[in-house]
Amino acid sequence: MKSKIIIGTRGSKLALWQAHFTRDNLEKMGIEVEIKIIKTRGDKIQHLSFDKIEGKGFFTKELEDALLGGQVDLAVHSMKDLPTESPEGLSIAGVSYRENPADWLVINKGQEDTSKVYQLKDNATVGTSSARRKAILLDIRPDINLKDIRGNVPTRLQKLKDGQFDAIILAAAGLTRLDLDMSDFVVVKLNTQEFVPAPAQGVLAYQTCTADIETRKIIKRLHNSEVAAVTNVERKVLNLLGGGCHMPLGVYCELDDKGYYHVWAAKAATWDGRVKRVRMSSGTSFELAEQVLAALKQEA
């Protein structure tokens, strides 16, 4: 068995948490681990919103290039940032547990209005660069002013604290994993069935070279098959729509204790377009994504 694995990761606090979490699990298996930080295009281009950056995989391509070039053995990604098709020669060897998949609305204290939906005051300025979050928020609160925001989680919270926004939307998974002090803010925990998350939100994907059988065997021991069962459905819908992670699409799937799959989906043609919602249950995941897609494409 391979005695050392080099992990490639982005350098943000959250990406490093993900790499360290993976390292700790590998070290428990007796494997030596080195972490190598790689800057991606998404890290370098901070002045544009995601939909203005050309192409897919702007948080992943450089990590994938490092894998293919042999500089690293394993790339740890936020699965929601990962395009649904791996480049030739690369495979997703496993996925992690799922942290809370929801989005949380973080409001500056004193700017909330408890009488309003999501506690957002009339015409509040909300920061997000996600087309999905924009579309769903406008669908529920059309009065809201949207403003793009970039940067890692602590940077975004600082911008909020500085008064550049009344509120911002962040993934619960990132806030939970970083265990940040949120005492300056009001946190509104959004319902995954209404404010539908990005496909595979809250999950880490472990990517390796397809030919690297040794690393793949090791990662298989970290793989969470129950999480894979639901994220496969979510990502299949995204794949069938031909979308990258900046498509205005939310898909969330749960597997209940009786083996039934329950899917919620929300899609818009554009970030400011009408949102189409779908709710579906099935005793099998076979062709479930195709059924969700067909329902999304039906005219209301």
Image (tube, helix red, strand yellow):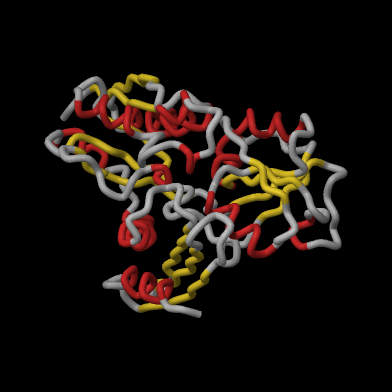
Instruction: Tell me which residue sits at (15%, 33%) in the image.
Output: 212
Residue 250, position as x, y percentages in the image:
49, 59
Which residue is pictured at 32% across the width and 32% down the height?
61
Percent position (x, y) of residue 174?
Answer: 56, 40
Judge whether 156 appears above or below 144 on screen.
above
Q: Is 41 placed above or below 267 here?
A: above
Q: With respect to residue 270, does 58 lie above or below?
A: above
Left or right, residue 206 beside residue 151: left
| Residue placed most toward the observer, 283 or 291 | 291
Whether residue 258 is visible to the viewer of this picture, yes or no, is no
> Residue 141: horizontal and vertical position, in percent?
71, 61
Residue occupying image coordinates x 17% and y 40%: 88
Residue 13 appears in view: yes
For the N terminus, which image quadrant? top left
The image quadrant that residue 189 belongs to is bottom right
Can you tell which quarter of the image residue 27 is in? top left
Residue 159: image location, x then y, percent: 70, 31
Relative to 276, 121 lies left or right: right
Q: Residue at x 64, y 46 (%)?
A: 169
Q: Is residue 261 left or right of residue 264?
A: left
Q: How many marks?
A: 0
In depth, the one of 27 and 272 nearer the eye is: 272
Residue 215: quadrant of the picture: top left
Q: Is residue 171 left or right of residue 144?
A: left
Given residues 32 and 114, the one toward you in this image is 114
On screen, residue 32 above or below 136: above
